[in-house]
Amino acid sequence: MADHVGRPVCRHRDEGPATWAMGSLFERLVDAEESGGALGLSLVTQPPGIATPLHRHTHEAEAFYLLDGTMTYRAGDESFDLVAGSFIHLPKGVPHAFRVTGQTPVRFLGFTVPGALMSLYDEVGIPARERRLPGDDGLPMAEEIARWNEVGPRYGLEVLGPPIPEVA
């Protein structure tokens, strides 16, 4: 690990690395290298309609704290409607998927323990040119999906099924 492990990490608004992936903005607050592997934390902004396939993580637990917007979350056999102020914890290995609902983007704090998963977004995405959602200047989705399929398994990401269907 780098020589800054064991030192405090302080980031202010718009500091630290930012990545565009999944049509979204991932702003890293702390990563595995900085936390001795213990924690990854990002501020994530995602547009309405974004949905992940059903998947699981075999290396870490994951948690979200929703700051703005709404989303539907499937975890195991349960579904949850999350709103600003909602928190969800997913133990390692639990199949899950989510869909951003409503008409506005969501913003949430995304935690992983241990923290290596956050580096996956850096590998499949591209550095954010600005602190905003990507537009045409982001990666084409076909190119990004190919990257996810190549890189995801190294991070213990297993795709299990389709996304949560869109509700009309």
Image (cartoon, rainbow, N blue to C red):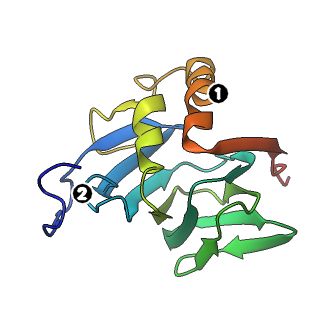
Q: Secondary structure at mark 1?
A: helix
Residue 17 locus on image (x, y percent): 25, 45
Q: Is residue 130 at least partly visible in the picture? A: yes
Under mark 2, the amino acid is Glu
| Residue displayed at 56% across by 24% down | 147
Marks counted in the figure total: 2
Q: Could you classify mark 2 by the number of other residues whose Cα lies within 10 Å: few (under 14), some (14-19), or many (20 or more)?
A: many
Label 1 or label 2, whichever comes before in sequence order: 2
Q: Is residue 125 at least partly visible in the picture? A: no
Residue 100 locus on image (x, y percent): 65, 56
Rendered position, 98 above or below 66: above
| Residue displayed at 13% across by 56% down | 4
Q: Is residue 10 left or right of residue 118?
A: left
Residue 43 locus on image (x, y percent): 38, 59
Under mark 1, the amino acid is Asn
Q: Nearer the viewer, mark 1 or mark 2?
A: 2
Instruction: Say which quarter of the image contains residue 22.
Output: top right
Q: Could you classify mark 1 by the number of other residues whose Cα lies within 10 Å: few (under 14), some (14-19), or many (20 or more)?
A: some
In three-dimensional space, the C-alpha distance between marks 1 and 2, rounded to whole angstroms, equals 27 Å
Q: Which residue is mark 2?
A: 34
Rendered position, 105 above or below 89: above
Is 162 in front, or is 138? 162
Q: Secondary structure at mark 2?
A: loop
Rendered position, 77 above or below 142: below
Residue 135 locus on image (x, y percent): 45, 30
Q: Which residue is mark 1?
A: 149
Mark carried by residue 124 = none
Q: Residue furthest bottom?
A: 85
Instruction: Say which quarter of the image contains residue 9.
Output: bottom left
| Residue displayed at 74% across by 41% down | 159
